[in-house]
Image: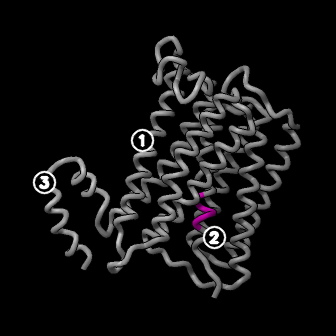
Amino acid sequence: MDVVKQLPAEADAVRSGGLLPAVLRVVRGPYALRGWSIVSLVMNIVIVVTGGLVRLTGSGLGCPTWPRCTEDSYVSHPELGIHGAIEFGNRLFTLVLIIAAALTLVSAMLYRDNGRPRPDLRWLAGGLALGIPLQGVIGGITVLTQLNPYVVGLHLLLSMVLIALAVWLVRKAWHLVPARVSGLSVAATRVTFVLMWLAIWLGTLVTGSGPHAGDENAPRNGLDAMLLTRLHTSVVYATVAASVVCFVLLRSKAVVLLLLIEIVQAGIGIVQYQLGLPIWLVALHLLGASLAIAATTNLVLSVSRR
């Protein structure tokens, strides 16, 4: 019914031409938000990896200031070399992400469910749209503080929050209804969710105490790297154990997906430690952390109490 009502409006937009009709064609309609929610999720995961590559290649101060790349230019120039190009490229990708988030928000504002607006979708899309500029500001602070490891960690954690919001938006846009389960099962998913966030936070502290600071002169947090690594590993094992409990209780696709990601992620973590943290494995570990947060969020949202 909604499709029939919206077709004339879209036909008028096509005939009138211009930028606004072109935008409306891609953001309105009963299925547009589904696509944009997936785009937002994927791009928020990708920017975690690209941001990690900036640090891993020593390009964290490739653009030595912010919001400009240099004191007199917003763009990188040849004198800054490959590090300037990498850092500026990541900043450009942030602009692309902002555009995608804005289009997702517009799609959520135009979305109608049986003729009614959906405030919950608007709030989620709005949170994503506001979070990305905030992420850019925190990224600027990391540059201005010469890659302070705690600010760098906050930069990653906010990305994880945005990934979780994007997963929530995907589930709502695709009308994925949570299964009605026992209180014990719900509690198990929540414990797994909390443990995963604790593992990610400890991972930022481990990173802040080790190599790959983003620049050879960047400060480290001065904490005991070995102790932090053991704490991080212990919480990871606890998270996997909690996930196994969830599997025994639920036997759902969501928990199977999470377990698969956790097993691969744990394997990458062990191998990268044994090999001395090669860049490509650390980048894969960042991707795995993003997927793990997404899968854990999906799990906790896939159930509700009977």
Q: Is residue 209 above or below residue 288?
A: above
Task: Give me the residue at 39% from left, 73% from top.
Answer: 117
Q: Which residue is mark 2?
A: 300
- Magenta residues span 294-298
Task: Give me the residue at 26% from left, 76% from top.
Answer: 2
Outermost residue, bottom side: 306
Foreground of the two, 75 or 298: 75
Tell me the element at label 1.
helix
* Residue 283 occupies quadrant: top right
Identify the disc placed on residue 50. none
Would you say 11 lies left or right of 133 here? left
Tell me the element at label 2.
helix
- Provide residue 194's location: percent of width, then percent of height: 73, 63
What's under tag 1, amino acid-wise?
Val
Distance Cα–Cα, label 2 vs label 3:
46 Å
Q: Looking at the rendering, in which quadrant would you find the N terminus?
A: bottom left
Q: Which residue is mark 1?
A: 96
Identify the disc placed on residue 16. 3
Question: How many neighbours does mark 3 have within 10 angstroms: few (below 14), some (14-19), or many (20 or more)?
Answer: few
Picture mark count: 3
Question: How many neighbours does mark 1 have within 10 angstroms: few (below 14), some (14-19), or many (20 or more)?
Answer: few
Tell which circle, 2 or 3, labels the residue nearer the N-terminal end: 3
* Residue 254 occupies quadrant: bottom right
